[in-house]
């Protein structure tokens, strides 16, 4: 497989002088010339600004680092000769929202060194794409500086105080599951020193949009943003048990990329592959064993089984019931979790959230024969996926993965990670790397956002880090269609988002009540179907119980919809209001639209189609779906390139379209 094909043009820049200091300014433009990153080195510090279409969107912003040894790398620096490269980057993603990526960029390398003191050297590397710009710090190997302990990274983002932001805020709690409702306000209203999670989305004056996140998070601490003296700056998760040290490393080393995506429309960010483009090619040489798909997940529905057919529990019969359902309905995976709060593996703690004083994930509980389950599932054409608490898994990682492979398990959900410090970042990469050696895929829950690592480790199928439909089991008020739009426009900038999809019991908002067993949904049946297209995830749940699906309107769509895509286009999109995404899988197109709580009519132009007639299946809100949200209307027809499909959406509504030859 051809993972990387680049054409590089290298130019060494003699940067013009400013005042009496030589080589103090440098800049790099995107290939289309619309985005400009301008670097300035003064006696006090390095800084930068970013412009888009000649409008400054990031004003003069500090770039400095603070170390426990030898202090701050900021003042009294010199800049050596810079290097500019033009790269025509082309690669293929094993799994993703796009199969063949063409992403040209220009790269500027800015070497800095201290003229006095420790004489340290650090390079700032900048890449300018047509849809954004990113920078990172690189630490070359040097005899006088073999290791470092970083106390602060001061990468700043000086935005207009009138910029309207949407982001997750966490006070000062670094140990969190990266879930919550999105806060929306002007930047001037944000309190100082409150942790802001990334990705964060900003609507700037002049209807420009900016998203800030990070890419290639490896052997480093995860990044938040905080406001300090009116300016956003990076704030890293500290190492456990203290607050001073954020990162320890041996040189050579490099930070993750600090990414700024820029556009006139927020939909561009959902089409972009900038995060995977900033990661290394796949480490899995033969990825043919990777099979993305859909999975059952009976914990969400409350472990519902038939009333009298068999005794439910952590046993073969309960899992067989769901395996048979998967086999009948083209659902690739069944999730072995446990039952009633008791895990499937040996444990002395009656809760999924803790591992207890004793846990052994290489042994199933006495009532469950894992080998029998895997063998039965295989005979039915279904694969097995298991749930594990990371604290139970990690101490016996190699033994567990070897046993899982021996049983025939294909992947797992690793849950309750709830941290983004350097140790946890390294643990997650170790899990991915060692799982790949045993042909296992990973689904992280209670985890920080994706950073494009699914390119390097395509066995990372999805991540949670979203306030998702599991909340409907206990929230007084259900998650709203507006929240679904926030997730799609903001969290999905970073990549795959696991959301506990598939609830098939929708009610009007005023009729909602939290139910741990058979949870209720707010949003129409068509809205729920559309979420399988709108959200990016390579392992989507079909989380309700069999009787909730079979014979129900729209379930046949879930049987057909893929989880990986060859092409992605945003057709319509207005923040807080509605979103239409079209995705291609092979020769078929799937179009999903989700709506907020206001009825509307939208046109979907089919100008992206190739020539020829397409058969079409359309799942729409029924005329009475506002009163009866589980109702939908299905129509069929024939359409071609240039046609327009007009859809009517009720409050909380949705629409899905399948186009095929």
Image (spheres, rainbow, N blue to C red):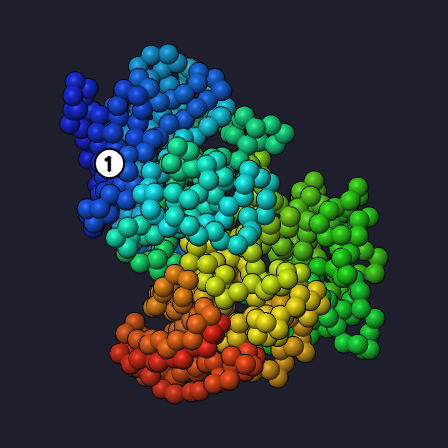
Rendered-image quadrant of the C terminus: bottom left
Q: Does 516 sit left or right of 180 as displayed?
A: right
Q: Nearer the viewer, residue 411 or 309?
A: 309
| Element carrying mark 1 | strand
On the image, the x and y values in percent for residue 156 come to 37, 35
Rendered-image quadrant of the N terminus: bottom left
On the image, the x and y values in percent for residue 318 come to 76, 69
On the image, the x and y values in percent for residue 238 come to 55, 32
Q: Which residue is depicted at the point 55% across and 48% down?
A: 178
**Does 373 sit above or below residue 282?**
below
The residue wearing badge 1 is 38
Q: Which residue is depicted at the point 28% across and 48% down?
A: 129
Q: Is residue 112 shown to the viewer in this render?
A: yes
Q: Nearer the viewer, residue 241 or 629?
A: 629
Residue furthest out toward the top: 117
Q: Which residue is depicted at the point 38% across and 36% down?
A: 230
Q: Which residue is depicted at the point 56% across and 56% down?
A: 467
On the image, the x and y values in percent for residue 96 come to 44, 58
Q: Does 118 sit left or right of 318 as displayed?
A: left
Q: Is residue 438 shown to the viewer in this render?
A: no
The residue carrying pointer 1 sits among few (fewer than 14), some (14 to 19) or many (20 or more) residues within 10 Å by Cα, namely some
Q: Nearer the viewer, residue 575 or 235?
A: 575
**Does 335 sit above or below residue 402?**
below
User: Toward which corner of the image does residue 408 lie, by quadrant?
Assistant: bottom right
Q: Does 530 sit left or right of 240 as displayed?
A: left
Q: How many marks?
A: 1
């Amino acid at each position: 497989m051809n993972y990387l094909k680049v054409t590089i043009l290298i130019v060494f820049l003699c940067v013009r002088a400013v005042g009496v200091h030589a080589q103090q300014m440098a800049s790099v433009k995107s290939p289309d010339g619309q985005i400009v990153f301008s670097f300035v080195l003064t006696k006090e510090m390095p800084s930068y600004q970013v412009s888009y279409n000649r409008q400054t969107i990031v004003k003069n912003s500090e770039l400095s680092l603070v170390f426990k040894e030898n202090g701050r790398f900021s003042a009294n620096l010199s800049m050596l000769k810079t290097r500019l490269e033009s790269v025509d980057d082309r690669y293929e993603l094993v799994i993703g929202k796009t199969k063949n990526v063409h992403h040209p960029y220009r790269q500027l390398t800015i070497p800095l060194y201290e003229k006095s003191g420790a004489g340290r050297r650090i390079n700032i590397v900048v890449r300018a794409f047509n849809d954004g710009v990113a920078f990172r710090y690189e630490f070359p190997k040097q005899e006088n500086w073999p290791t470092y302990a970083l106390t602060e990274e001061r990468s700043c983002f000086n935005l207009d105080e009138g910029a309207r932001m949407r982001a997750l805020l966490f006070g000062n709690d670094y140990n969190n599951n990266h879930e919550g409702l999105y806060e929306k306000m002007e930047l001037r209203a944000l309190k100082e020193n409150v942790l802001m999670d990334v990705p964060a989305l900003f609507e700037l004056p002049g209807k420009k949009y900016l998203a800030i996140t990070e890419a290639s998070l490896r052997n480093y601490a995860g990044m938040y943003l905080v406001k300090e003296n009116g300016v956003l700056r990076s704030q890293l998760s500290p190492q456990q048990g203290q607050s001073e040290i954020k990162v320890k490393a041996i040189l050579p080393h490099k930070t993750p990329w600090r990414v700024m995506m820029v556009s006139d429309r927020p939909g561009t960010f959902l089409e972009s592959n900038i995060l995977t483009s900033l990661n290394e090619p796949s480490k899995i040489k033969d990825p043919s064993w990777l099979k993305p798909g859909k999975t059952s997940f009976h914990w969400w529905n409350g472990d519902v089984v038939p009333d009298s057919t068999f005794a439910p529990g952590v046993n073969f019969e309960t899992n067989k019931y769901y395996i048979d359902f998967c086999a009948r309905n083209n659902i690739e995976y069944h999730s072995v979790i446990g039952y009633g709060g008791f895990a499937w593996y040996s444990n002395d703690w009656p809760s999924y959230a803790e591992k207890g004083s004793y846990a052994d994930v290489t042994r199933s509980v006495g009532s469950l024969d894992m080998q029998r389950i895997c063998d039965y599932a295989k005979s039915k054409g279904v694969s097995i996926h298991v749930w594990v608490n990371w604290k139970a898994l990690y101490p016996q990682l190699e033994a567990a993965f070897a046993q899982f492979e021996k049983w025939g398990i294909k992947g797992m959900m690793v849950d309750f990670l709830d941290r983004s410090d350097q140790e946890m970042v390294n643990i997650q990469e170790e899990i991915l790397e060692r799982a790949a050696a045993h042909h296992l895929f990973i689904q992280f829950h209670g985890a920080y956002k994706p950073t494009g690592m699914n390119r390097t480790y395509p066995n990372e199928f999805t991540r949670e880090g979203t306030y998702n439909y599991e909340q409907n089991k206990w929230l007084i008020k259900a998650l709203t269609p507006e929240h679904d739009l926030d997730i799609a426009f903001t969290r999905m900038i970073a990549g795959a988002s696991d959301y506990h999809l598939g609830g098939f019991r929708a009610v009007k908002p005023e009729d909602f009540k939290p139910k741990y067993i058979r949870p209720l949904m707010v949003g129409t049946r068509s809205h729920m179907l559309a979420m399988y297209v709108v959200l990016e995830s390579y392992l989507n749940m079909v989380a309700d119980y069999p009787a909730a699906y079979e014979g129900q309107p729209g379930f046949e769509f879930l049987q057909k919809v893929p989880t990986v895509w060859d092409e992605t286009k945003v057709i319509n999109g207005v923040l807080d209001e509605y979103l239409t995404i079209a995705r291609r899988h092979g020769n078929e197109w799937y179009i999903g639209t989700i709506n907020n709580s206001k009825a509307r009519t939208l046109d979907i132009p089919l100008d992206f189609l190739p020539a020829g007639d397409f058969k079409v299946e359309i799942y729409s809100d029924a005329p009475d779906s506002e009163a009866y949200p589980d109702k939908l209307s299905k129509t069929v027809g024939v359409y071609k390139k240039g046609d327009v499909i007009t859809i009517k959406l009720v409050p909380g509504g949705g629409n899905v379209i399948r186009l095929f030859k």
